[in-house]
Amino acid sequence: MIEEYSQYVDKSIIREIEILAKRLENVKILHVNSTKEGGGVAEILMRLVPLMRELGIKVDWKVIKGNKEFFRTTKKLHNLLHLPQGDTLNSYDLVNYLQTTYENLREIDTENYDVVFIHDPQPMGLVVKKLKGQRWVWRCHIDTSTPERRAWEFIEGFLNAYDAVVFHLPEFANKGIKIPTFIIPPSIDPLHHKNVELDAKRIEEVLEKLGINREKPVLLQVSRFDRLKDPLGVYRAYRIVKEKYDCCLVLAGSFAPDDPEGEEVYTEVINATAEDKDVYVLNLPPDSHIEINALQRHATVVLQKSIKEGFGLVVAEAMWKGKAVIGGNTGGIKSQIVEGITGYLVNTPEGAAYRAKQLLADSRLREQMGKRAKEYVRQRFLIPRHLRDYLLLTCFLLGSKGLKFKA
Ligand code: UDP
């Protein structure tokens, strides 16, 4: 229940949530995304939606369907929105996207809702079904600060039909957006299995089950197998560290149904690291929350060396467990890591190796940074704040039109 969060956040935020939830009790809200598990969006919705229901809000979560070709197109779009890469959407991609959107328009009922939150580009085209009086929000989880031009024009074609857009950070809202724009960073849930306290025995059991060496310090990165997460860069950093420290590297990941590149990247990582017995490449089921929790708690040094990152929930997850994270100097990671205070920001594998050696050498430094990191997350990135922001936004969108909203 919402009251349980008062052990982590100020009681005033809990009261605000209760007041806002009461006002929204006649309102029907829908969230739509492209996968029920795997990746940060699903991770957030699987916590946020039940919490909203407990508060008496009528909320549903629906997932669009698509074949591998559709998700190849949308992964290409996702990558192009993150950064130009000498390629662009072609006419096949456009037809493919529109065809699957058309199929989902028939499958997904959006008519019975007052407010519809569409997450990321995959279900974005559903907005053509928007009814008069409804409020539609595009919730973007991507760093769109430097998108490839045609990919952004594609997004804009749908965006103007929305009533509002939400980004994680102000710099993601590129110029020229004509609809109201809001900034709401995401969150982690301290009551989720992934983040709750674990005792040493439980951690030990998980490590044993996963076959991880417990004698050597562990460098860890938890990520979908995705090139933008730079797993091979992390491996290079580990090789440099290994010249001085006898440590292990754990690359824990999983496949998400809406990311068809995962298997290719997994194979690349397996091939690159095959000779090294101290490297563990774990392909875990997407609901391995306790396993990820235990790995993050056990790790000596946590890395998230992304090249581009919308937010990077894994950074907040590790910081919440008192870890100093070495993160790629990009996007949402920059909003979580305060350089030299709550962790380190790096641009290269060499930089990551340098910082990892520094942390491995100094347990006091790790402890002090980890403490500050946890507090930083507590103040900014826990679920009550996120929920409050969504409820406020919903009240704002409905209130301004005098809909079913109880004033
Ligand atoms: N995750 C997981 N198992 C894995 C890899 C990732 O449970 O093997 C979770 C991770 O703990 C985090 C989410 O998936 O909660 C990833 O979110 P993030 O924002 O870091 O990255 P995204 O995948 O959305 O790009």
Image (tube, rainbow, N blue to C red):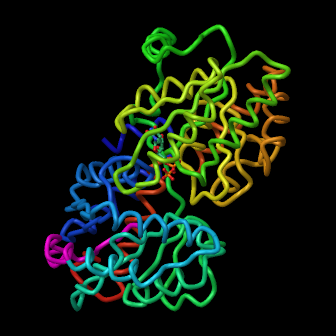
Q: Nearer the viewer, residue 212 or 32?
A: 212
Residue 81 found in image quarter: bottom right
Label total for image? 0
Q: Position of residue 365 (x, y in %)?
A: 81, 27
Q: Quadrant location of the C terminus? A: bottom left
* Residue ID at (66%, 60%): 331
Q: Is residue 118 above or below residue 153?
A: above
Left or right, 150 with respect to 70, comes to right
Q: Position of residue 167 (x, y in %)?
A: 53, 70
Q: Is residue 223 above or below residue 289?
A: below
* Residue ID at (33%, 71%): 123
* Residue ID at (56%, 29%): 296
Q: Is residue 150 above or below residue 191?
A: below
Q: Quadrant location of the N terminus? A: top left
Q: Is residue 113 magenta?
A: yes
Q: Nearer the viewer, residue 61 or 285?
A: 285
Q: Is residue 311 above or below residue 360?
A: below
Q: Position of residue 199 (x, y in %)?
A: 48, 14
Q: Position of residue 64 (x, y in %)?
A: 25, 65
* Residue ID at (47%, 8%): 201
Instruction: Give, as a single range, the part of the protein colored magenta.
Output: 103-119
